[in-house]
Amino acid sequence: QKEVEQNSGPLSVPEGAIASLNCTYSDRGSQSFFWYRQYSGKSPELIMSIYSNGDKEDGRFTAQLNKASQYVSLLIRDSQPSDSATYLCAAQRTGANNLFFGTGTRLTVIP
Amino acid sequence: EPEVTQTPSHQVTQMGQEVILRCVPISNHLYFYWYRQILGQKVEFLVSFYNNEISEKSEIFDDQFSVERPDGSNFTLKIRSTKLEDSAMYFCASSDIGGRNYGYTFGSGTRLTVV
């Protein structure tokens, strides 16, 4: 079973703070990782992808990958109420096209 | 921005009936997928489709399910004899190069309710 684990939350942060979302994966064959945002009743929306160890920044978002620890994280700086959503971590195995999703972490940004 | 279109947005069907969920992927994409999400649960992979054939499928995608690309634009998921546990959001997705490192674009989903 190729598990992707996330803390379901809810995670609450005040507006303007940094939100830190974490994800671990069990399959060492996973090479690409994705963070999706999902608003209630809506489809997942891709925020970031990462496949090399280290940090990758895009605007207010920073993804971090540590393959040795099998750990992926997403930092959201200057959190806004509009960031309130469920954040899904997904892993993709080398040579495969399908994604394995975690259950998601629900984030609430308090104005 | 190009998008993946799914119809219908909601479908209610009686147990044992057949349903067809429809998707129009992004026009220059080559890989197509179906995922489902049971209420409150994780997004689960069903099947991927490339070059007019299934490239990968999960254990969920049993003989009850089939996919088809009947023309150059549509991609369909058929559930032959629906069960109560098939009630879920079904998402279609597409990607240009297998989604590796780039992820997918998901459609807005079809909420299927089996009664």
Image (cartoon, grey):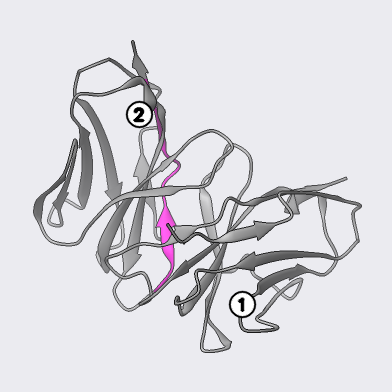
**Residue B110 shows up from this direction:** yes
Residue type highlighted by circle 2: Asp
Q: x%, y% of residue B7?
A: 71, 58
State which quadrant residue A31 falls in: bottom left
Which residue occupies the extreme left position in the image? Answer: A54
Check the residue under mark 2 and report the chain it is in. Answer: A
Subunit that carries the residue with mark 1? B
Q: Do the residues labelled 2 and 1 touch (CB within 8 Å)?
A: no
Residue assigned mark 1 = B73
Which of A98/B99 is in front?
Answer: B99
Quadrant location of the C terminus of chain A? top left
Q: How far apart are marks 2 and 1 (CA)?
A: 34 Å
Magenta stretch: residue A47 in it? no
Q: Where is residue A34 in the image (x, y as percent from the top left)?
A: 31, 54
User: In the displayed image of the protein, which residue is found farthest to the top?
Assistant: A111
Question: The N terminus of chain A is located in which quarter?
Answer: bottom left
**Which residues lie in the magenta part?**
A97-108
Residue at numbered disc 2: A83
Tell me if B70 is positioned left or right of B27 in this view.
Answer: right
Q: Does the magenta stretch include residue A103?
A: yes
Report the residue at 91% width, 52% height from top. Answer: B14
Q: Is mark 2 on a helix, strand or loop?
A: helix
In the figure, is residue A3 to the left or right of B81?
Answer: left
Q: In which quarter of the image is residue A62?
A: top left
